[in-house]
Image (spheres, rainbow, N blue to C red):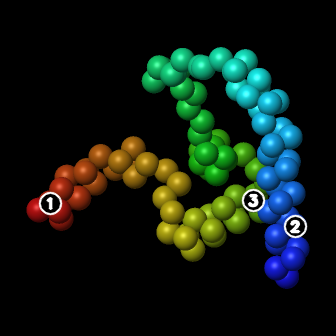
Amino acid sequence: MPELRQRDIARGKRKQEELAPYVEKAMARRQAMQPMRDEEIPVFVALGRKVAEEGTGTERQKQNAKLWADAAKVTLSDPLRHNPKATVKQQEMDS
């Protein structure tokens, strides 16, 4: 409906004009943050990986996780951790 759209656009413009002084004052008070150094950036483990590695959960949850991982073909653990020779095989296949 064109008349509703026009009314909405006009209302949005009026609202921006009314709020403009407050937005300007707020932006003037804003203090710029210093960029974080790499060592300050927190590292979070994905919940799915955390659950898989810790082995927490009921037996049913563990079965479901395995079913979903098998269906999605998502590796829940580092294959090189358990089989360091896999790197050599992979390099041979890539050559």
Location of residue 1 in the rendering, given as x and y in whole percent from the top left corner: 85, 82
Q: Quadrant of the C terminus?
A: bottom left
How far across and how far down the image is residue 79, in percent? 40, 52
- Residue shown at 66%/46% (left/top)? 47
Q: Position of residue 56 (x, y in %)?
A: 72, 46
* Residue 55 visible in rendering: no
N-terminal of the two: label 3 or label 2? 2
Between 67 and 34, the residue placed more toward the observer is 34
The answer for how far apart the CA atoms under marks 1 and 3 are is: 38 Å
Q: Secondary structure at mark 2?
A: helix
- Numbered badge on residue 23: none
Q: Amino acid at mark 1?
A: Glu
Q: Disc 3 marks which amino acid? A: Gln
Q: Nearer the viewer, mark 3 or mark 2?
A: 2
Q: Which residue is mark 3?
A: 61
Q: Earlier in the sequence, mark 1 or mark 2?
A: 2
Q: Can I make out residue 45 in this image?
A: yes
Res. 92 mark = 1
Residue 61 horizontal side relative to residue 90, left or right: right
Q: What is the number of the mark on residue 7?
A: 2
Q: Residues within 10 Å of mark 3 (few under 14, many from 20)?
A: few
